[in-house]
Amino acid sequence: MKVKIAMLAILFTAFALTFSVATPAAPGTKAAVTRQPAAPAPAPAATPADHPEIRDALAALRRAKEHLQHAAHDYQGHRVEAIRATDEAIRQLEICLKYD
């Protein structure tokens, strides 16, 4: 049970990190029509390639997948689906890093 809860926490964290990026307003909406003069952007605190939380989540997901693949039991039939979800979370996070 503890392993299942830990796996769900890891997957939730990975998905939260994946989808926490703000999206711009759709063209033609009020936000897109009323443009403000651009203010000078503050210096970024981190370089574009530096995302320690995402990299940590990727490492944790890979470890969890390895554990699931070599587990002695199938977690009452949930192991295959958990591996599939872990693969998808890894794929999404890798895409996030690629398009930084």
Image (cartoon, helix red, strand yellow):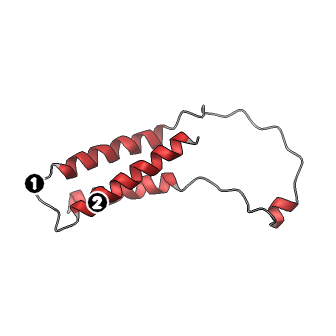
Is disc 2 in contact with disc 1, using a CB cutoff of under 8 Å? no
**Against 52, is 33 above or below?**
below
Q: Residue at x 64, y 55 (%)?
A: 22
Callout 2 environment at 10 Å: few (<14), some (14 to 19), or many (20+)? many
SS for callout 2: helix
Q: Residue at x 23, y 45 (%)?
A: 66
Q: Residue at x 34, y 47 (%)?
A: 61
Q: What quarter of the picture does the N terminus occupy? A: bottom left
Residue placed under numbered mark 2 in the picture = 82
Q: Residue 83 falls in which quadrant of the image?
A: bottom left
Q: Residue 11: give x, y in percent of width and height.
A: 37, 56
Q: Residue 8: give x, y in percent of width and height.
A: 33, 60
Q: Residue 60: give x, y in percent of width and height.
A: 33, 44
Q: Residue at x 23, y 65 (%)?
A: 78
**Against 43, is 25 above or below?**
below
Residue type highlighted by circle 1 = Ala
Label at residue 72: 1
Residue type highlighted by circle 2 = Ala
Q: Residue 63 falls in which quadrant of the image?
A: top left
**Against 4, is 53 above or below?**
above
Residue 61 in view, yes or no:
yes
Please tell me which of labels 2 and 1 falls first in the chain: 1
